Amino acid sequence: MTPSIAKGTRDFSSEEIYKRRHIISVLQSNFEKFGFNPLETPSFEKLQTLTGKYGEEGDRLIFKILNSGDFLENVKEKDSEVSTWNSKNIIPLISEKALRYDLTVPFARYVAMNHGKLTFPFKRYQIQPVWRADRPQKGRFREFFQCDADVVGSESLWYEVNFILLYDSVFTELQLPVEIHLNNRKLLAAIAEYAEIEDQLIEFTVALDKLDKIGLDKILEEMVSKGISQKSLDRLVPIINLSGSFEEKLIQLKEIFQDVEIGLEGIKELEFIYNSTMQIGLQTADLQFNLTLARGLDYYTGTIYEIKSKNVAMGSIGGGGRYDNLTEIFGVKNMSGVGISFGLDRIYLVMEELNLFPKSTQKNKQILFFNFGDRESIHALMLIQKIRLMGFACDLYPEKTKLQKQFSFAEKNNFEYVVFYGEEEIKNQTITIKNIIIGKQETIATDQLSDYLND
Amino acid sequence: MTPSIAKGTRDFSSEEIYKRRHIISVLQSNFEKFGFNPLETPSFEKLQTLTGKYGEEGDRLIFKILNSGDFLENVKEKDSEVSTWNSKNIIPLISEKALRYDLTVPFARYVAMNHGKLTFPFKRYQIQPVWRADRPQKGRFREFFQCDADVVGSESLWYEVNFILLYDSVFTELQLPVEIHLNNRKLLAAIAEYAEIEDQLIEFTVALDKLDKIGLDKILEEMVSKGISQKSLDRLVPIINLSGSFEEKLIQLKEIFQDVEIGLEGIKELEFIYNSTMQIGLQTADLQFNLTLARGLDYYTGTIYEIKSKNVAMGSIGGGGRYDNLTEIFGVKNMSGVGISFGLDRIYLVMEELNLFPKSTQKNKQILFFNFGDRESIHALMLIQKIRLMGFACDLYPEKTKLQKQFSFAEKNNFEYVVFYGEEEIKNQTITIKNIIIGKQETIATDQLSDYLND
């Protein structure tokens, strides 16, 4: 049997893992500095916990786990007329568990299950894989990590401000220049009201989202074809054409929405968030007002975030927003919250492209002792143990064989140093150590090894 | 809908995660110091990669993933006579993927797939969850982590020695006193040959495994009932009764097995491993020769390890051994290897019982700024950002409300410090900071905050 890997999945080599770990550790330490604590939920949930939360398409893309044992028994009992069986109605009879599709629904399930015990506002971060039965394609996998931070149980806009500071802090530490795009779901509602396109709001935002790609004329065409009237378009164009700085855009919108209450509300929120953030100050990120930003329209109710790399065209590398009623579907009401997410795979790709990974994401120096036979190996391992206790990665070649072969092993495995510790060295209490990257070899006293390696 | 969690799974709270992370980070850093590099494989594999590798019982306990789309189409096409369908023969038609059952088979699949690219001996460690459809019970879960380190492609006994040093190093760092039990599969084969119980070897080892629990008389009874002859028992009893130090036991066995070649081989290996390890020296672990140790008899071919806590009765908290032909089933021959595993859940329980977790597994000091209103909050966040950059976890209470309420929030969320930074303090460039654990409050200049917190 020739082995292969399941479609849409990946093995991660140590090099990739060290790089991913670099990103994840920056995320973790920042989440924690911003007062989020980790949460981990199981890889699978009851199917009914997930079903109906992601729309019809989402339900289809959830990986279902087959019941154990004689799972068909159930079906035969219910309906012996097998010709009527079909894949859709049989699912709940043969599957009661499913793989996590995102981190939000399990988080909502956790909050609802434990809401008597938790103190609110409750902040958590979660970095775990999720699974989707999407058709795999370049950059889209069936197993991938999500990295979320949320706070629920408060409507305070200070959380919105803090998430901007958090994004800024993470991407500054990763040395990855980004734009933080900001919008507010209330402004989209205001546009709908102002231009009388309440019924075509989704079509409008879908078209609007393509502004950067296809330009104004094309999206107006598309809107007309979707049944948006000329009268509406006349009111929409000045909004779409809004230009200037963050503040200038807000001033113009205030004028346009002077009679649209929900619009003024959205503007007030954005003003507070923008002004506060500017006074506190960002390290490296640019904050931009992006009225075309829609992101999961159905889900968000207030602020919407999206992150773009300044230098690499990659789409969004993060996003989030404020939502109402995280847990209502699980019977717990009034849980407004706000959360953001980081796109690990895309951040990885951008950092690769910009060469932003530290030269050595592997912290340890790697040292290989050559093997000169059993007697020498005992002495070698005594020294190796000391070197490991100093915190370095150190190993003994497993067999006495030609030095050429041992040397080639060291090179192929990216060892930085090789050590000769034969009879002579053992007697003299010295070692001969060679940095094979710069090609420099020295013989030093064994008790100077610590100084040598820490240099 | 009242939410609940799937049977046999767990949510991990932040406190548990910080403790698990403490163990995992000790494992990771030691694996790396001993020259192992990380590998991660996907959560699911092709079903055919896993089927047939864990015995019939194992096959039953593998979680299968239902195919997406119209999965019944397949079945109906193949066999429209639905009355003949049964749960077992239908599985390969409706499921082609399954959740990882252990880390060894995916590792073997990885080595076989990449054996042209890898350099051997190849060392990897892997810390990932696995899933088993076992009946959940106290301490047994359907999702749990395995922590494995293996080296394949060499028969060198230095690896066996290094694994003992690795166990010693990990448990010394965790401050958890352990016994490392050692045996060799060849000695079990030698016993079978010597006592002429080749056909009852499994029954013999199963009974032998209970020696500690039920005593010699009972296990002899059990052996008789399994058809082991009196003549065989006469030869077995002196072996079972073997006593003395590691070396003394080896000397006696050498005498007993003087004509059993495979026995002498096993003794020679154990002798080499024991003597080398003793010369190099262990930090805290006890090394014991345990002839009753069988562990997955079918799988191991040489050295067998098992780890027991010295102070807590918990069964094995780790184990492993040498095996032949890791990848033969995937068409790649002659891959002898040796590997060990750490039982994360059990190590956690033992450390809890012995109170071995560091007081604060959470590295950061937690600081909460009280909220005195929007104007003050701007200033507070400027200072909070500086504190976060110092590496501490710092947050602002989200709303201006009664101090009593803010204080109670700080207590419930285990903040170590609360900070009063109101109009007066802002004007004077001071802060009032209270350590709520020891109940000490001070007013200091804001520019002394770093010294204060790093104290």
Image (spheres, coloured by chain):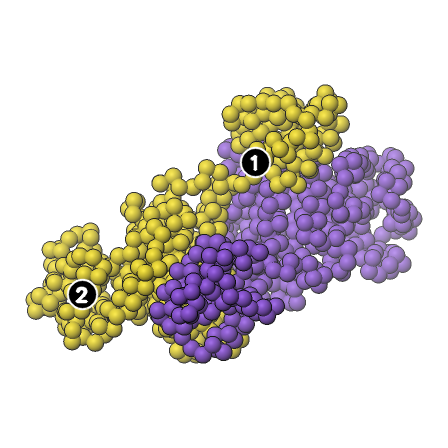
Chain colours: A yellow, B purple
B87 sits to left or right of A105: right
Frontmost of labels 2 and 1 is 2
Measured as percent of width and height from the top left, residue A329 is found at 40, 75
Instruction: Kindly tell me whether residue A193 is visible in this rendering.
Output: yes
Mark 1 sits on what residue?
A365
Count of marks placed on residues: 2
The amino acid on which the numbered mark 2 sits, given as a three-letter code, is Ile
Q: Position of residue B143 (x, y in %)?
A: 57, 60
Q: Secondary structure at mark 2?
A: helix
Subunit bearing disc 2: A
List the single residue furthest toward the front: B428
Tell me residue B9's x, y (percent): 56, 65
> Taking A242 as reference, is A360 above or below it?
above
Residue at label 2? A251
Dot 2 or dot 1: first in sequence order is 2
2 and 1 marks on the same chain: yes
Q: Is residue B259 left or right of residue A20?
A: right
Q: Residue at x 46, y 60 (%)?
A: B446
Q: Secondary structure at mark 1?
A: loop
Residue A3 visible somewhere in the drawing: no
Mark 2 neighbour class, 10 Å CA radius: few under 14, some 14 to 19, many 20 or more: few
